Amino acid sequence: MVIFKKISDLQNHLLKLRATGSRRVGFVPTMGALHAGHISLINRARANGDITVASIFVNPTQFNDRSDFDKYPSSIEDDISLLAEEGCDVLLLPSEEEVYPEGEQKMQSYGFGYLDGILEGAHRPGHFKGVGQVVARLLDIVNPDFVYVGQKDFQQCIVIRNLISLLGKENEISLTVCPTIREADGLAMSSRNRRLTEPQRALAGLIYQCLVSIQAKQMDSSFKIVQKECMDLLEEKGFLPEYVSLADAADLSLLEEYDKSKKMVALIAAKLGDVRLIDNMVIN
Ligand code: PAF
């Protein structure tokens, strides 16, 4: 695996690689603290025959909460070893100055309309503005043919799909959303899980159980009732639930009730102590 800190060096390297054959570039953007979910994206890119490029950059502009940014887990040496072992070809490890050479304020930003004001957009003001900024910049740097992202960040997947359209790159870049990878108790793998204490970790699988019950009860219950049951249960067990919601999986328009004519997605965000967890499940 070749590691680049300078964007121009990465771009020269990719130009040479592209010139030597017809292989295409598959890109996995990350913020590091890698886990099996990230590795599944790398494997997907490799299985597709792409030159696999990963980036690790903890983007400050997408954190609405400074302490979340300060406490974001980092394990750069382990991440590098893992990526190399898994056959990633190229890693971009840029500094903030490389990504935002004229300062983050001067970067073009993008609006995602309705998505900015619901769920993650509502609870993390400015988050998707930051995600849009950094992903647009990374796409410009790497110029990939394929981008691989995890379904765990369901709303982010839709935002990135919309961003690719806003950039007019929908015919150049194919976005692949890969399934969420879970721990044995169902907890969705996330870099933030590392910050859970042992007792918190023992409780964290409850979010998945709530999603399973939202899925299971669609035939014989009202979503409003199941939603309240989940909120109450999470609170009772010591979570601070932010939302338990149901939406149309195609565009994330929120649903008040189960609508079996649509492919739906249930989404949950809840805090355990100061660790914020999100998860979702597509309901058929
Ligand atoms: O999902 C993430 O890790 C980040 O939001 C991303 C897409 C790498 C942008 O910083």
Image (cartoon, helix red, strand yellow):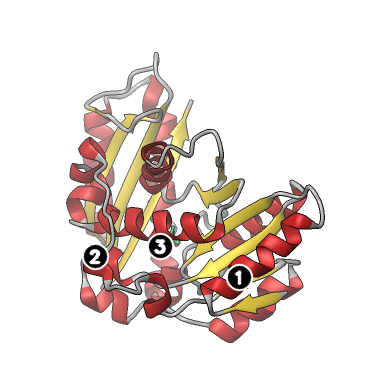
Residue holding disc 1: 10
Q: Is mark 3 within 8 Å of ligand 1?
A: no
Q: CA distance from mark 1 to mark 2?
A: 23 Å
Q: Nearer the viewer, residue 93 or 78?
A: 93
For residue 130, above or below residue 153:
below
Is residue 183 at least partly visible in the picture?
no
Question: In what element is the residue under mark 3?
Answer: helix
Image quadrant in which the N terminus is located: bottom right
Residue placed farthest to the top in the image? 261
Q: Amino acid at mark 2?
A: Lys
In this view, the mark in front (2 or 3): 2
- Between the residue at mark 2 and the residue at mark 3, the CA separation in whole angstroms equals 39 Å
> Judging from the image, what secondary structure is the residue with disc 2 in?
helix
Q: Position of residue 123 (x, y in %)?
A: 19, 54
Q: Residue furthest right?
A: 21
Question: Disc 3 residue type?
Answer: Ala
**Three-letter amino acid code at the position of disc 1:** Leu
- Res. 106 mark: 2
Q: Which residue is mark 3?
A: 204
Q: Quadrant of residue 70?
A: bottom left
Badge 3 density bin: few <14, some 14–19, many ≥20, Cα 10 Å: many
Q: Position of residue 196 (x, y in %)?
A: 39, 75
Viewer-nearest of discs 1 and 3: 1
- Which residue is found at the position 33% from the left and 80% from the top? 71
Give the residue drawn at x 22%, y 76%: 66
Of callouts 2 and 3, the N-terminal one = 2
62 left or right, relative to 12: left
Residue 83, quarter of picture? bottom right
